[in-house]
Image: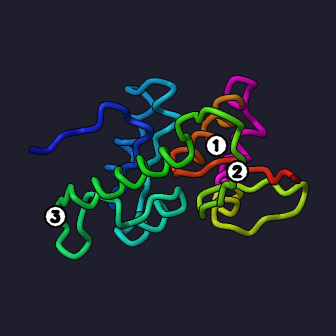
Amino acid sequence: MQVTPNHMAGVHLCTDEMSEHLRLSYSIVTATSKKLRSRSRLHYGSQTECLYQMSTYGIPQSCLPVDPATNKISIQRHLKWVESRFKMQRRDHPLPSVGPSPIYLIIPTENDVLVMGGSKCTNTGNQRLRVLVNDLSKTYETGSTEIRKDLAACVIHSVYDSGGRFLKQHAF
């Protein structure tokens, strides 16, 4: 039995045909809600180019339901990725304990965005964030206040959707 998720965090669509790309772009703009539209990404190019573009959003090839060797759907690959996300969520949000508050040491993952007090971080999460902000900068500069708010929310959600967090180092 195959099932679909009951909660959709985002949509990534890939195509290698320009006419299909234009049709999908129009469909996303006209037929989806504002919230889903801000969480939708359309990728154009070869399979390799699309896989690379998706990796910049923190989507590893291993979690895609298509097996690259056979080009057939393999839901097991996706289910392994979903299970890893559940494990990460349980680790990041443990159940409260009784007694004195424990001190948690959070180890950043490659998808996390690190705030280092003005220093430039070169980890993958920060690099992805810079690419995304750079891609949206022209729209942000010329957009209305409402568009700017939507773009900021889109950037934040894309970090969270890729499994990243915004982390700041605190002194003990």
Q: Which of marks 1 and 3 is nearer the N terminus?
A: 3
Q: Where is residue 77 shown, x and y percent of the image?
A: 27, 61
Residue 47 found in image quarter: bottom left
In this rendering, is residue 161 above or below 58? Answer: above
> Which amino acid lies under the numbered mark 3 shown in the image of this protein?
Lys
Can you tell which mark lies on residue 72?
A: 3
Q: In this view, does 13 lie above or below 80?
A: above
Residue designated by label 1: 155
67 sits left or right of 82 in the view: left
Q: What residue type is labelled 2?
A: Val
| CA neighbours of label 2 inside 10 A, class few (<14), some (14 to 19), many (20+) | some
Residue 164, percent from left and from top = 59, 51
Residue found at x 69% / y 55%: 105
Q: Look at the picture and state if 103 lies above or below 69.
A: above
Q: Residue at x 43, y 69 (%)?
A: 49
Mark 1 near mark 2, Cβ–Cβ under 8 Å?
Answer: yes
What amino acid does circle 1 point to? Val
Residue named by callout 2: 133
142 part of magenta stretch:
yes
Is residue 51 shown above or below 90? Answer: below
Q: Earlier in the sequence, mark 1 or mark 2?
A: 2
Q: In front of the other: label 2 or label 3?
A: 3
The coloring applied to the image is rainbow
Which element carries disc 1, helix, strand or loop? helix
> Furthest-left residue in view?
1
Secondary structure predominantly adopted by residues drawn in magenta: helix
> Could you tell me which residue is drawn at 90 percent across and 54 percent down?
117
Which contiguous range is marked in magenta?
Answer: 131-148
Seen from the viewer's position, the closer of residues 96 and 32 is 96
* Quadrant into which the N terminus falls: top left
